[in-house]
Image (tube, grey):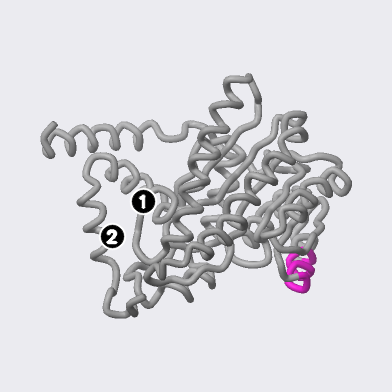
Amino acid sequence: MGLFKKLFVFFVGFSLAFYFYSGDEFKPEMLKGKRIIVTGASTGIGEQIAYHLAQMGSKVLITARREERLKEVVAKCLSLGAASAHYIAGNMDDMVFAETVVKEAKNILGGLDMLILNHIGHHKYGYFSGNIDEIRKLIEVNFLSYATMTVAALPMLEKSNGSIVAVSSLAVGKIGVPFVIPYASTKFALDGFFSSLRLELALQNSNVSISLCILSYINTDAAVKSISHVVNQTPAPKEECALEIIKGAALRKREIYYEYALAKFLTLLRTWAPEFVDYGLSSTLNIENMKPA
């Protein structure tokens, strides 16, 4: 098929997808009283998810590394109207800890309705040095802990007809980009794991939903600090991003795109014109600000 025909089919498909997108309506009361784990909740998107859930009257159990920061987030959640708010501090490179968080949800919350996996490991933005250990360590935090918590949570989620939400991104979970090879490796793995698990659960008539979040550049402190000197793009607000994740999760969306038009468009376009997408993404980078490996 020629390039013109490919682009024509793509734009027709995209227009239809956009036209028929989401006929369901989100209502905040959908989350009232729901028992929810939010990882990576001491800052950024996870913190904002916790605050939105609190305002909706959810029962939240948050986790991250920094205990003092988690205490502050829990206090604010309670002031915003959370039905209950608790925290567990620890590091997700420890699979025992990852599993313990889920087990504690049963003790603290009495069960689980939603598991929101949002935490990430530290990574250096730059040319790949060839250090395989860097990939191995990041896989533990960004992928294996997600799988560990999911397996541990499934029995409770089966009982509650619950949901799993895995936060990924457009540029490293769907489309390859430079300077983030270890990080991108882990995010692509999430797509494979959760997409395959979703199908297996459906074949077993499970009522557990799985939502994969495909996010654009968001104005979290970590992201802005890491890439703002190279990426020539205005980041989207983390508060709105967090709300869109919650909406999509409550509506049990297969994939949650934010910002929708940009993320969905590029994901679809990559199938039909990958070279064009590569060129477009590369043109937004200030390469002169990057140092060689």
Residue 255, numbered label: none
Quick check: 150 above or below 121? above
Residue 58 locus on image (x, y percent): 75, 48
Give the SS element for disc 2.
Answer: helix
Residue 114 locus on image (x, y percent): 69, 42
| Mark 2, other Cα within 10 Å: few <14 / some 14–19 / many ≥20 | some
Q: What residue is pinned by disc 2?
A: 281
Question: What residue sits 44% from the left and 71% below the top?
Answer: 125
Question: What residue sits 23% from the left and 65% below the top?
Answer: 283
Q: Which residues are magenta?
A: 67-75
* Residue 281 placement, left or right of 163: left
Question: What residue sits 24% from the left and 36% below the top?
Answer: 10
* Residue 127 placement, left or right of 133: left
Closer to the N terminus: mark 1 or mark 2? 1
Give the amino acid type for the residue marked by disc 2 in the picture.
Leu
| Mark 1, other Cα within 10 Å: few <14 / some 14–19 / many ≥20 | some
Residue sitting nearer the eye, 246 or 197:
197
* Residue 146 placement, left or right of 263: right
Q: What residue is pinned by disc 1?
A: 175
